[in-house]
Amino acid sequence: MHLDQEQARGRIAVFGATGSIGASTLDVIARHPSRFRASVLSAHQDVEGLIALCVRFRPDIAIIASEAHYTALRDGLAQAGLGTRPMAGSQALSDVAGSDACDTVVAAIVGAAGLGSTLAAARAGKRILLANKESIVVAGALLMRAVAESGAELLPVDSEHNAIYQCLPTPAIGAAARPGVRRVVLTASGGPFRGWRREQLANVTPEQACAHPNWRMGRKISVDSATLMNKGLEVIEAHWLFNAAPDAIEVVVHPQSIVHSLVDYVDGSTLAQLGNPDMRTALAYGLAWPERIEAGVPPLDLAAIGRLEFQPPDERAFPCLRLAREALREGPGATTVLNAANEVAVSAFLQGGLRFLGIPEVLQSTLARLHERGAGDLPSLLELDKQARRLADSLIRHEA
Ligand code: NAD
Ligand code: MG
C-alpha cells in the first residue's frame, strides 16, 4: 500500500477491543481494509486475547488497563514479533484517546471505567462512537460540554440511540431545540424475563439473566437488560444525547428487537429505524458517517419475521426503569450514584453474592442514603462514584 493510501485510512482506536462491541467493531473494520485501520486496541486483563487481536490487526499501540499485566503484554508482543507498542493503566487509555494515534475512538469499555478515555477523546475533538453508556450516565453534562467545546463528532452506537439519531431531522448531537419533534421512543426487548411476574424472579441465576433472547452481549449489560436497568441507563443517555426532557422519552417493550427505536413528530408522523439485531449496523454507521458501508448484516426479511409486537414495560416486576427516571429528574449527581451502585450490585449478583431482586433494592437504598450530590465537576463526580460504590458494597455485605 502506498503511503498516501495508508494515511487516507481512518485510524480507529478500539477501547474494549476484547469485548462484544470490540469484536463487532473489528469485524466491520476488517471488511474495509482500504478505509479503516485499527491503530489502537485495549483490554482490561485478557493479555492473551489482546495479543491475538494484535497479531491479526497489527495496531501501533496495545493498552492493557490492568498494570499488573504490563510485562506479559510487552513480552507477548515481542515474542509474536510485532512492532506494537505496549502500554498499561487507565491513564494510558486517556492519554492515547486524546493523542494523534487515532482519528476515531470506539468507546466500548464497560462501566464508568470508560469515562476517562471517552472524555479525553471528546476534549481532543475526535470522532467518538459511543457504546459505553455508563460514561454519559456518570458525567453527561461534562461530556456534552467537552463535545460542544472541541467540535468532537459524537455518534451514538447504542442501537436505540443510533436509531433515533438516524430518524431525527438534523442529526446534530446535543442541539438546543428540535423543531417538530414531539418525543423519542426507545424500544426494549424486555430481556430474558419478559412477561415474568415479580414472584417468579426470586431465584433466577446469573446464567438465566445472561441468556438474552436476541443479542449476544457482555455479562454486565446482559444483566442490565434482564433488570430493565439497561433501558433506564438509555433513558438518561437519550436525555443528554438529544437534549430531550425526561417526559419526552418514552419506553415501549418490543420483543423482536427489529424496530430499534422511533421519533414522534408533532404532525403525527412517527419515523423508525429497523434492522436485524446486529450491532455491526450501528458501528458501520458510526465508522463511515455520513456515508453508508457494508456491515455484514443481512437485509431484513419482514415476511419471515411475520409480526412485530409492542407492549408497556412492567415497572412492578422491573423497578430499575422507574429508579433511573427518578435519578434523572433529581439531577446529575443522582445518576452518578445510580450507575455506581448498579455496577457494584450487578457484579455481586454475577458472583453469587446478591439476589436478582436485591439489585433494585441496593440502588434504592444507596440513592436514599447518599444525600451529598457534589458540585458536578469531574473530581466531585469521581468522589461520588467512589462513595456510592463503598455504600452499595456495605449494603450488600450487610444483606448477605
Ligand atoms: P464486554 O464485557 O463484552 O466487553 C467489555 C470490554 O471492556 C472488554 O474489552 C474489557 O476488557 C474492557 N474492560 C472491562 N473492564 C475494564 C476496565 N476496568 N478498564 C478498561 N477496560 C475494561 O461488554 P460489551 O457488551 O462489549 O459492552 C461494552 C459497552 O458497550 C458497555 O457500556 C455496554 O453497555 C455497551 N453496549 C453494548 C452492546 C452490546 O451489544 N454488547 C450494545 C449497546 C451498548
Ligand atoms: Mg441499547
Image (tube, helix red, strand yellow):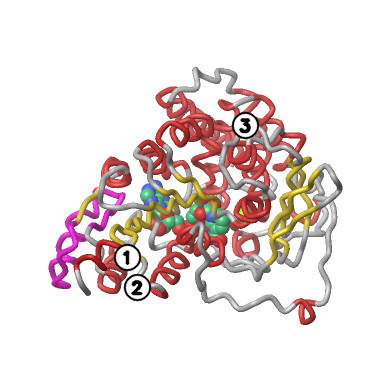
Category of crowding for the residue at label 3, using alpha-carbon neighbours closer than 10 angstroms: few (below 14), some (14–19), many (at least 20): few
Mark before the other along the chain sequence, 2 or 3: 2
Q: Please name the residue that numbered disc 1 is placed on.
A: 37
Q: Position of residue 280 (x, y in %)?
A: 53, 67
Q: Nearer the viewer, residue 9 or 89?
A: 9
Q: Position of residue 193 (x, y in %)?
A: 74, 60
Q: Check if mark 2's residue and mark 3's residue have beta carbons within 8 Å.
A: no
User: Which mark is in front, 3 or 1?
Assistant: 3
From this viewpoint, is residue 218 visible? no
Residue 376 against residue 105 in the figure, above or below? above
Q: Please name the residue that numbered disc 2 is placed on.
A: 33
Q: Nearer the viewer, residue 150 or 202?
A: 150
Q: Nearer the viewer, residue 323 or 28?
A: 28
From this viewpoint, is residue 258 visible? yes
Residue 388 against residue 104 in the figure, above or below? above
Locate residue 307 relative to residue 323 in the image: left or right.
right
Task: Give the structural element (helix, strand or loop) at label 1.
Answer: strand
Mark before the other along the chain sequence, 3 or 1: 1
Q: Please name the residue that numbered disc 3 is placed on.
A: 176
Q: Amino acid at mark 2?
A: Pro
Task: Give the structural element (helix, strand or loop) at label 3.
Answer: loop
Q: Check if mark 1's residue and mark 2's residue have beta carbons within 8 Å.
A: yes
Residue range (magenta): 61-85
Q: Amino acid at mark 3?
A: Ala
Q: Identify the image quadrant of the N terminus.
A: bottom left
Mark 3–mark 1 distance (CA, rounded to whole Å): 34 Å
Mark 1–mark 2 distance (CA, rounded to whole Å): 7 Å
Mark 1 within 8 Å of ligand 1, using the beta carbon: no
Locate residue 162 relative to residue 7 in the image: left or right.
right
Residue at x 41%, y 39% (from the top left corner): 122
